[in-house]
Amino acid sequence: IGADFGYDEINLNVGCPSDRVQSGTFGACLMREPDLVADCVAAMKEVTGDKVGLALDCGPGWMLGDAIRLARMLEPYNLMWIEDLLTGDYTPWVNAGIYRELTRTSTTPIHTGEQIYLRQNFKELIETQAVRVVGPDPADVGGIAELKWIAEHADLHGITMAPHGTANGVL
């Protein structure tokens, strides 16, 4: 699919299981069941194989138990990451403790950060290795210099950086 059109990766918004998020544009509740998400990923990977990297934007809104179940179900598919399962689009802060618990339960890389404001709010997330991938948005963290600080801090702690908003002309 993606490789035929020249894409190296696909970031798919699968939504979240929460009834509290109803927007059709941001964080839509597209798939409410971990089994359905896993079935869709299996079908996509059957078509793309490992030629095209696949990442999932899953939230926000999953409860920790469901997020753990989903992350474990997705392990066989070698995803680039699963993003914003617990918090994200509507939460400018992060609970590093619950992200750390999720990250430690699965080999599927866990990603968050697009709505976290300022570099100080990334410190605990990075220093406790609560996620494997951070995705700060330069507009939310205070610009390119702050994004650079987060990238360097993440690198020092072995955390991958995948900035958000790379198609908006800022990066």
Image (tube, grey):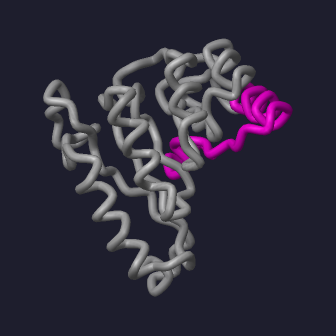
From the viewer's perspective, tell me whether residue 83 is left or right of residue 136. left
Region in magenta? 145-171
From the viewer's perspective, tell me whether residue 14 is left or right of residue 158. left
Residue reaching furthest bottom? 4
Q: Position of residue 74 (x, y in %)?
A: 44, 55
From the viewer's perspective, tell me whether residue 103 is left or right of residue 22. right
- For the point 51% across and 15% down, which residue is it? 95
Q: Position of residue 55 (x, y in %)?
A: 48, 56
Placement of 17 over or under 36, stated as above or below? above
Residue reaching furthest right? 156
Q: Position of residue 130 (x, y in %)?
A: 62, 27
- For the point 51% across and 31% down, which residue is it? 102
Q: Is residue 149 magenta?
A: yes
- For the point 40% across and 79% down, which residue is it? 46
From the viewer's perspective, tell me whether residue 6 is left or right of residue 61. right
Front residue of 108 and 123: 108
Q: Position of residue 149 (x, y in %)?
A: 78, 27
Q: Name the quarter where the N terminus is drawn.
A: bottom left
- For the point 55% across and 43% down, which residue is it? 106
Placement of 95 over or under 36, stated as above or below? above
What number of labels is visible? 0
Q: Is residue 160 magenta?
A: yes
Quadrant of the rendered structure where residue 120 is? Answer: top right
Quadrant of the rendered structure where residue 8 is? Answer: bottom right
